[in-house]
Image (spheres, grey):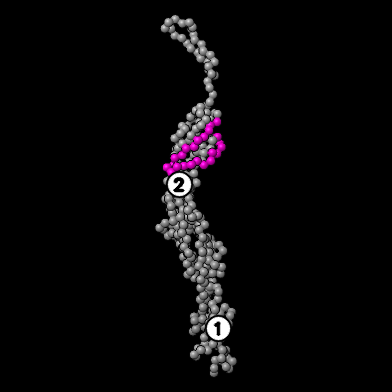
Amino acid sequence: MAIVKVRVQVDGVWTNLTLSNGKWVGTITAPATTSYNLANKYYPIKIEITNDAGTVVTKDATDATLGEALRLIVKETMKPAITLVSPSKGAYVTNNKQPITFKVVDEAGGSGVKLSSVKIKVDSTTYTTSSTGMVSKGITNGYQFTFTPQTALKDGSHTITINASDNDGNAATAVSSTFTIDTVPPTLTISSPTAGLITNKAALNVTGKTNDATSSPITLTMTLNGTSLGTVTVGSDGSFTKAVTLAEGTNSIVVTAKDGAGQTTSITLSVKLDTTVPELKGITLSPNPVSTSASVAITVEVS
């Protein structure tokens, strides 16, 4: 008996082997898709042996003796991708339990995201998909995760780092980002004019100081009688001065400071401009003439 033909089948493709030094050898091409999603997580290989009498013997992955050797495990090489959704890099937020949303997506037909590999580190603490506050939902080829801190974070800058792998062991490129929490509105004081000022000069300087310890610089705006005067320049020490021109009568000045997190502090001033000139309409002295050292009543009429 002589063996005249040996061939193998993988994923429906047959390859003939060649006799070399008493053994049948050859090269097969692994399937282009990971075997992870197959029912048994491997590609079964079938071997067909034919002798010169025409007898054919077939072995496959179910064979009790050689079955395990006929199971080809194929792993993808593409690593999954991590995308940070929110908060964006460098963002200022007012919520000290700011939810962090991100996506992990594997290639189409890939082994899929390994849930146990997904980790998010907030500052020095690492959280997993089983941590309290972590919620996930399936999306195309992966998952979207939202992690909500269960303990309030302090005002200031915070660093997050996200890691994940697929089921074939390919690690995604880690994503790191920072965001700043600011729960305190900016400070704002007006040193001039004083509230309720009455003046006869239309030209007026509004001066004061503003600051925010967490999310400076401050954006300062001002309105006069409901009309915007635009953005006011704020010095490095927080001081500002804005020249305004009052209208006759009562004027409303609103100064608003906004920090990087979008929180605002406003002060409203009421200032009255009165440029009218008093007019002496008449004066009466009674009695007139009067005795020495006697009292004289004076009546003045002014408009």
**The disc label shown at residue 240, or none:** none
> Which is nearer the N-term, disc 2 or disc 1?
1
Q: Residue at x 52, y 34 (%)?
A: 244
Name, please, the residue furthest toward the left. Answer: 124
Q: Residues within 10 Å of mark 1 (few under 14, many from 20)?
A: many
Q: Element under label 2?
A: loop
The residue carrying mark 1 is 8
| Span shown in magenta | 225-247
Q: Element under label 1?
A: strand
Residue type, mark 2 in image: Ser
Residue 43 at x, y = what percent? 54, 77
Q: Is residue 86 above or below residue 15?
A: above
Residue 300 showing in the rendered view: yes
Residue 96 at x, y = what percent? 45, 50
The residue carrying mark 2 is 216
Residue type, mark 1 in image: Val
Queried whether the magenta region covers residue 89, the answer comes back as no
Residue 132 at x, y = what percent? 45, 58
Residue 131 showing in the rendered view: no
Q: Is residue 251 left or right of residue 150?
A: right
